[in-house]
Image (tube, rainbow, N blue to C red):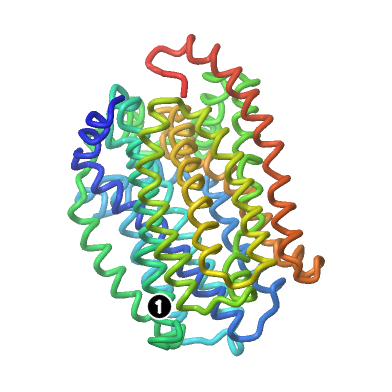
């Protein structure tokens, strides 16, 4: 695909909605992640405690359990007006807005349990919303458009995600609570409720996919006619059975194992990234600018570049190159741990890291989308993304314990994250080999 053809793909107005919903997916991680981490650290809690509270993100790894409900259950009133995907997105947005409003009336030192439970509710709502966001991104394009559109949809979605998590939502939130403006973290939460009112209004304007269910799903609409056993067999067991049947056990199992281990090196830093930046010596204002704004902009821009490269050279090659480069980026962070708060080195590390993070993320989303059935879109995508999140979130929860065990030696920590990339790269080569025979047997599919 030429550069001009790539630019033409980006003119598709449906990608604006994909960007918006990417923002909606990224922004909650600021609420239960970035802000809460700094609030807990400022309140005197240990690295281990911060890491374990971060385990609430494990809900992103198990949202496949309730994905069949989100795929099938039609919400009263909202469904008729907004359709299957947008109705669930709006419901989750409303719950998140109410939850962070409630969080703002408590403090960690006095009400850690209450704040943790409200943060968990934010994470659950966000993980539920992601099911519909991912399904929307696939449903908005026809099967015939997948090869040309999906890498760009993935790139725009990632750009939106990092706009929410990074250079717009994340940077704004940390700047509000930083040294210059100096709002309390409770007040920051109250300010961010206004952002949610804007997001909810924009969801109203997003186009509704022409087909939100397959013909089989439309014929089966009205889940109340099934017994519990029949419903579980058809809508819970069915998606897993279809995936293994279509791909074959060897390829299907290898894909799921790859999703589990490929990003483990990235996962080890997890929630500890902000703790690392503070302990190295960066201020909250510097973190807001460099890590959130600068890093987020880099990722958004590089995601679009990654889409062009992946459509030209293939997803498997893109994943392999990105995996090697991400390991190298971790060594730059190890050097930063030794040198201290050097902003030039920090910018270089973020430049390398965000480029290949974006590159890998585009390839990863495209990779998963290629193997997602149109009959069970939300459920199968949720399954595969959940397995990917499982390794990331479980390791992120224990990363604080690892740092404490290493007595705060961040350099050794980053060397360990580099070594953890190797198993994923080996498995990727094996999956690429298996996919050659799969693509020749699947009409309508093109090998990534």
> Does residue 160 appear in the picture of this structure?
yes
Image coordinates of residue 118 in percent, x first then y, are 51, 73
Residue 317, given in percent of the width and then of the height, sits at 52, 28
Find numbered disc 1 in the image and state the secondary structure of the residue it sits on: helix
Above-or-below relation of 232 to 114: above
Task: Tell me the residue at 34%/54% (across/down).
Answer: 89
Q: Name the residue: 67% across, 61% down.
A: 397
Vertical arrangement, residue 311 with respect to residue 77, above or below: above
Is residue 348 shown left or right of residue 83?
A: right
Residue 162 lies left or right of residue 239; in this view the side is left
* Quarter-of-image position of residue 11: top left
Q: Could you tell me residue 308's position as x and y percent?
A: 36, 34
Q: Quadrant of the N terminus?
A: top left
Where is 120 relative to 11, above or below? below
Q: Residue at x 47, y 36 (%)?
A: 363
From the viewer's side, name the closer residue of 362 and 143. Answer: 362
Number of numbered tags placed on the structure image: 1
Residue closest to the eye, 305 or 400: 305
Does residue 94 appear left or right of residue 245 in this picture? left
Neighbourhood count class around disc 1 (C-alpha, 10 Å): few under 14, some 14–19, many 20 upward: many
* Residue under the image location 45 percent in, 46 percent down: 358
Question: What percent of the width, then of the height, locates residue 48?
Answer: 72, 71
The residue identified by callout 1 is 175
In this view, 55 is above or below 319: below
194 vs 265, nearest the viewer: 265
* Residue 132 appears in view: no
């Amino acid at each position: 695909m030429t550069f001009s053809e790539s630019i033409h793909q980006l003119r598709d107005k449906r990608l604006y909605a994909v960007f918006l919903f990417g923002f909606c997916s990224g922004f909650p991680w600021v609420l239960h992640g970035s802000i809460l981490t700094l609030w807990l650290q400022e309140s005197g809690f240990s690295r281990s405690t911060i890491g374990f509270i971060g385990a609430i993100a494990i809900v992103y790894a198990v949202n496949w359990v309730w994905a069949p409900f989100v795929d099938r259950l039609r919400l009263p009133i909202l469904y008729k007006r907004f359709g299957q995907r947008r109705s669930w997105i709006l419901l989750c947005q409303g719950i998140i807005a109410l939850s962070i409003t409630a969080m703002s009336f408590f403090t960690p030192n006095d009400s850690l349990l209450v704040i943790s439970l409200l943060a968990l509710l934010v994470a659950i709502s966000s993980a539920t919303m992601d099911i519909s966001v991912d399904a929307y991104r696939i449903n908005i394009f026809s099967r015939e458009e997948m090869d040309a559109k999906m890498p760009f949809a993935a790139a725009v979605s990632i750009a939106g995600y990092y706009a929410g998590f990074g250079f717009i939502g994340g940077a704004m939130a940390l700047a509000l609570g930083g040294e210059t403006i100096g709002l309390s973290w409770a007040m920051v939460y109250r300010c961010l409720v206004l952002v949610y009112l804007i997001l909810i209004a924009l969801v109203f304007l997003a186009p509704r996919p022409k087909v939100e269910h397959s013909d089989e799903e439309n014929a089966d609409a009205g889940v109340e006619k099934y017994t519990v056993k029949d419903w579980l067999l058809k809508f819970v067991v069915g998606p897993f059975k279809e995936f293994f049947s279509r791909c074959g056990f060897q390829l299907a199992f290898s894909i799921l194992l790859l999703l589990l281990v490929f990003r483990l090196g990235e996962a080890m830093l997890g929630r500890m990234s902000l703790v690392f930046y503070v302990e190295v010596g960066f201020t909250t204002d510097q973190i807001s600018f460099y890590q959130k704004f600068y890093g987020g902009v880099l990722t958004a821009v590089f995601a679009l570049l990654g889409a062009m490269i992946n459509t030209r050279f293939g997803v498997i090659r893109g994943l392999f190159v990105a995996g090697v480069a991400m390991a190298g980026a971790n060594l730059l962070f190890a050097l930063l741990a030794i040198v201290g708060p050097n902003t030039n080195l920090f910018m270089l590390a973020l430049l390398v890291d965000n480029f290949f993070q974006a590159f890998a993320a585009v390839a990863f989303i495209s990779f998963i989308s290629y193997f997602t059935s149109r009959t069970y879109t939300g459920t199968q995508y949720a399954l595969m993304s959940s397995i990917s999140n499982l390794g990331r979130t479980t390791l992120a929860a224990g990363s604080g314990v690892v740092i404490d065990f290493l007595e705060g030696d961040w350099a050794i920590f980053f060397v360990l994250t580099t070594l953890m990339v190797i198993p994923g790269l080996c498995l990727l080569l094996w999956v690429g080999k298996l996919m050659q025979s799969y693509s020749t047997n699947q009409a309508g599919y093109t090998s990534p």
